[in-house]
Image: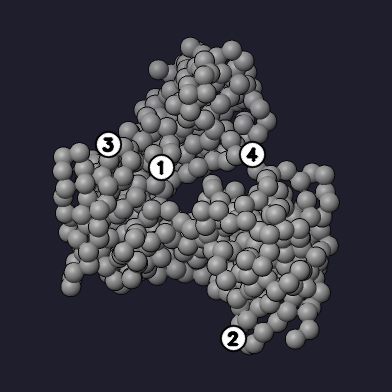
Amino acid sequence: MSAAPYDIVIVGGGPAGYVAAIRAAQLGLRTALVEREQLGGICLNWGCIPTKALLHAAEVWRQVQHAGEFGIRTGEPSFDFASIIARSRAVSGKLTQGVRHLMKKNKVEVVEGDAKLDGPGVVTVHGQSGGRRLAASHIVLATGARPRDFPGAAADGVHVWNYRHALAPARLPESLVIVGAGAIGMEFASFYAALGTAVTLVEGRERVLPSEDEEVSAFVDKAYRAQGIDVRTGAIIEGIVVGENCVDVSLRTPGGVETLRAQHVLVSIGIVGNTEGLGLEKTRVIVESGHVVTDPLGRTAEPGIYAIGDVAGAPWLAHKASHEAIACIERIAGLEQAHPPQIGAIPSCTYGHPQTASVGLTEEAARADGRKIRVGRFPFQGNGKALAIGEAQGFAKTLFDADSGEFLGAHLVGPQVTELIHSFGLARVMEATEAELMQNVYPHPTLSETLHESVLAAFDRVIHI
């Protein structure tokens, strides 16, 4: 089995891998991309995109139910759950085909199958059509990650779910226990509760969205409870037992031990990198806590082998993976412009109802760092556009260094905040101070004016409240 020569072989076709392949091709590198399942990876097929299609359906359902508030008369509204799921899958399928088109357009050879390192600069691929050996000076691992199972209760797709199962169930569950109140758990809680499922959300830490600013977590907790979601924080899962037609979840809270019974349990307690079966044991590549150890440009301890995206560790975000991919490839190509994403400038978004978005330091982190800070807050209740569209719940919060005016972070909760956070991400990248953010002109009437007012509020110059 002879080895086909390439400049670079990329293993994995998700947001890290396919973006890396495109950038490598743009730079004139002969590139092969190995994918064992579907181009687009988890994000396009079983993560970011299909969940947003489901959440948008839930949002449309909310709007229909409240149409009368806008003077619009409708008949008795209803929904077809199977059609909601089918549309979500169709959106993913369309994007997967789009990625395949991009590979063809950029003359990237796609090799289908399982990849394994087979000596210096060689990748062996085994697929349905047989085996191939690919030789390259540089090998980039972009194999992603998979859901972490709860010990003793692996996801079976029947009663115990992971996010894949929650994306395409045969029918709408009557009851659902969700273990983990991070972004994935919160989004599925929002979706299923909107459609009528009795949802219980269990989080071991003391608050939902524990990585977000405390004020944002508290606001979302209250909003979810108001939607009928049973939120249990500070609750440690002691066991999951599957019955004939149900599942029992035992949890310990400050008040004692309790058992929750539901039709299904969705486990969203994190992910583990796909490092097995790659032949890493024959290299100097270091794997710690299920993830490949790299430097900021994706280089591992083995010369010529790189790792990017979820397999290389947190934050596990598609947009971080794509930026990481470009920096890695540009470094391989010898470009001086190669810059890894700035961790403090990577936005974090959760697309439930209400949405949350953040970038930079939380207030707790800034104070723990010993900084003297100024904090600005502005509610969407004071924003004309938010009132006009009937979505005036939430707020924008901004943080600045009190001495230098350095912009430290922003934390948003409310309407379309995931579409607004990028401006604050840019401010972090450009090392902006309050002066630049105050001088920027925000169009009226837009939700973005709330961001401006929060900056003004931090320096006692707020206008509309």
Provide residue 315's location: percent of width, then percent of height: 54, 47
Disc nearer the start of the sequence (3/2) = 2
- The kind of residue tagged 2 is Gln
Point out the tag, 3 or 4, that comes first from the N-terminus. 3
Instruction: State the residue in front, 54 or 368.
Output: 368
Amino acid type, label 1: Gln
Q: Residue at x 59, y 86 (%)?
A: 128
Tag nearer the camera, 3 or 4: 4
Closer to the chain start, of discs 1 and 4, is 4
Q: Nearer the viewer, mark 2 or mark 1?
A: 2
Residue 32 % position (x, y) = 73, 71
Residue 222 badge: 3
Mark 1 or mark 3, earlier in chain: 3
Type of the residue with mark 3: Lys
The image shows residue 391 at horizontal and vertical percentages of 36, 37
Residue, disc 4? 342
Rounded to the nearest angstrom, the CA distance separating label 4 from label 2 is 40 Å
> Are the residues at dot 1 and dot 4 in contact (C-beta closer than 8 Å)?
no
Q: Quadrant of the C terminus?
A: top left
At numbered mark 1, what does the secondary structure look like: helix, strand or loop?
strand
**Which marked residue is nearer to the observer: mark 1 or mark 4?**
4
Badge 4: residue crowd in 10 Å (few <14, some 14–19, many ≥20): some
* Residue occupied by mark 1: 355
